[in-house]
Amino acid sequence: MAERFQVDLSGMVDLLSRHLYSGPQVYLRELIQNAVDAVTARQNVDPGAPATIRLSPGVNAAGDPTLEITDSGIGLTTAEARELLATIGRSSKRDATFGLGRNEFIGQFGIGMLAAFMVADRIEVTSRSLTPGAQVIRWEGHADGTFDVHELTTSDTVPLGTTVRLTARRDTGHWLSGDTVLGLAREYGSLLPFDIAVSVSVSDSLDPVWHRVSEPELPWRVAHASDRDRSRALAAYCERTFGFTPLGHIDLELPVAGVSGVAFILPQSVSPGSGQHRVYTKRMLLGARVDRVLPDWAFFVRAVLDTDALTPTASREQLHDDEVLFGVREAIGVQLQQWALRELRSDSRLARLVIGTHHLALRGLALTDQSMLDLVTEVLPFETTDGPLTLAQLGAAGEVVYTTTTEAYRRVAAVARAQGIVVLNAGYVYDADLLARLGQRPGWSVRELASADLVQALGLPGVDREWELADAVARARELLTPDDCDVIVRSFSPETVPAILLRDPEGEHRRDRDRERSASPELWGGLLDSFAENTTSRTRTLVLNDTSAVARRLLAAPPGAVFASGLRALYLSAVMLAGDGLRSSESAALADALGQLLESALAHPTQEDPA
């Protein structure tokens, strides 16, 4: 007489397929887990017993796809089959016969078997138990929630172990096809230590060919003749697993936490937060894209890990983010840091490749770790006006002076370089924060570049020249008053630069507030007036180069439209040279200035002109 499951089977299958598992494909993982646990249980009793699992896709007489999974495990008695296959959450691994709470088992037999109903309407289990005198049993479960268990009389011809046979539903036949089963078995079980094989049909042969999908040893624990051979083998494994050729690998071993694996260094830079790793539990694949198992800053590697201590979620596709995982994550972070501290100081080819490719990750790590900050100061090159230099080299030469934006660096780079001033470009991600952190450490002098630094380094004109230029400079200052820009004259290289624009950060903030107040006096005036400062200093300084022929011509020009247009053209050209875009009004002013200069030139042609 048919008996019923102690659960609403249709509701459970819906729960499994729609809300617990990522998709129907996990049915095969659950069945392989059951087979692995059965084999493990038998080997605990009989260490010399065979450890084989065979998967045979096929088709029944009605043309429906089928799948048989046969293991050489411990088998089931009639009572065990009735209890374990019909009670959700009950597991043979928890049974006192097999050892309560033993951690060498992977899954839960009841849930694993019911997961097969995501792809099958009918499941048949034939099993012969290792228990002396036990009869061969056959359990048949149906999607309508009923099952039958009965004993067979032909026990002698059935080997010890269990065979699970699935018959696909009409809409799920593709999940039991040969190619799909082979791919899923390789995906989930490639690192299992047992002999797992899938039968593959060959067109010119009546007998199937068995394709082994499992490996006897973890790839990172396989012995090789040399370190080079091992590196090549691991690189090949990475190519098969992740699809890229790594720059190198980092061994990860945490014996106390039961975690081992290898991290592969990506050959290209990636953004933070993109680290997803391949994690196995007791050598069965947990997930190919597991996050939070490595520190956030370790996004420059992809790891393969095997663990017998971390706790899977209910779906067994992610890890519980608990205290154990937190400790493992921290310990792996320490190992990655130790590798970086050791390898990146070696000036090896690998070190240069990693630094060139993953400098962003190293910068981010240095913000949170003092030892990595020391490493970054030693090995990481930064862009400076004297070429690529490390922070250690800059610090040894004295004060470290930097700009917080790339635009500010480009504005002063040419002139600073010509005057022998070394300025660091800290306009890239993490750089300004790194320098601020470095400036807090004893023995380091670090500060942002100020306008006065360049002004003091530029050559002052003589007293006679200053008197000669006094009127022209006064006129220029008056003309640029609406732009909040001062005008000075200095001598500097290169002479091809007629003028540069200097700005200080605080002055720029004040300038922006003034613009907002002018644009919307009714809306912002009262609020922004409270931030206004009583100061006569200007936020910008136009430095005219007295060694430039263009600047000298302007300074020698008489008062009038030509002088004003020339000054306006030099000022706006300096704004663009500083990396700033022109507003529409400034673009119009530049066009007017150039038009005025062109009109003046045409009205007073030189002797060399054709006119």
Image (cartoon, rainbow, N blue to C red):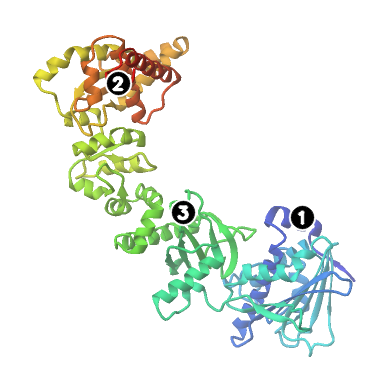
Q: Nearer the viewer, mark 1 or mark 3?
A: 3
Which residue is denoted by mark 1 in the rendering?
Answer: 14
Left of 351 or right of it: where is 146? right
Q: Quadrant of residue 215?
A: bottom right
Q: Quadrant of residue 540?
A: top left
Query: Alpha-carbon distance for marks 2 and 3?
Result: 42 Å
Check disc 1 and report its element: helix, strand or loop.
helix
Check disc 2 and report its element: helix, strand or loop.
loop
Sequence order check, earlier mark of 2 and 3: 3
Residue 161, x across and y down, in percent: 71, 81
Residue 539 is tagged as 2
Which residue is denoted by mark 3 in the rendering?
Answer: 299
Please indicate, yes or no, whether residue 56 appears anywhere in the rendered image. Answer: yes
Amino acid at dot 3: Phe
Amino acid at dot 2: Thr
Query: Alpha-carbon distance for marks 1 and 3?
Result: 36 Å
Query: Looking at the image, which is closer to me, 454 or 592?
Result: 592
Please indicate, yes or no, whether residue 319 appears anywhere in the rendered image. Answer: no
Residue 225 lies, with reference to residue 312, above or below; the image says below
Query: Alpha-carbon distance for marks 2 and 1?
Result: 68 Å
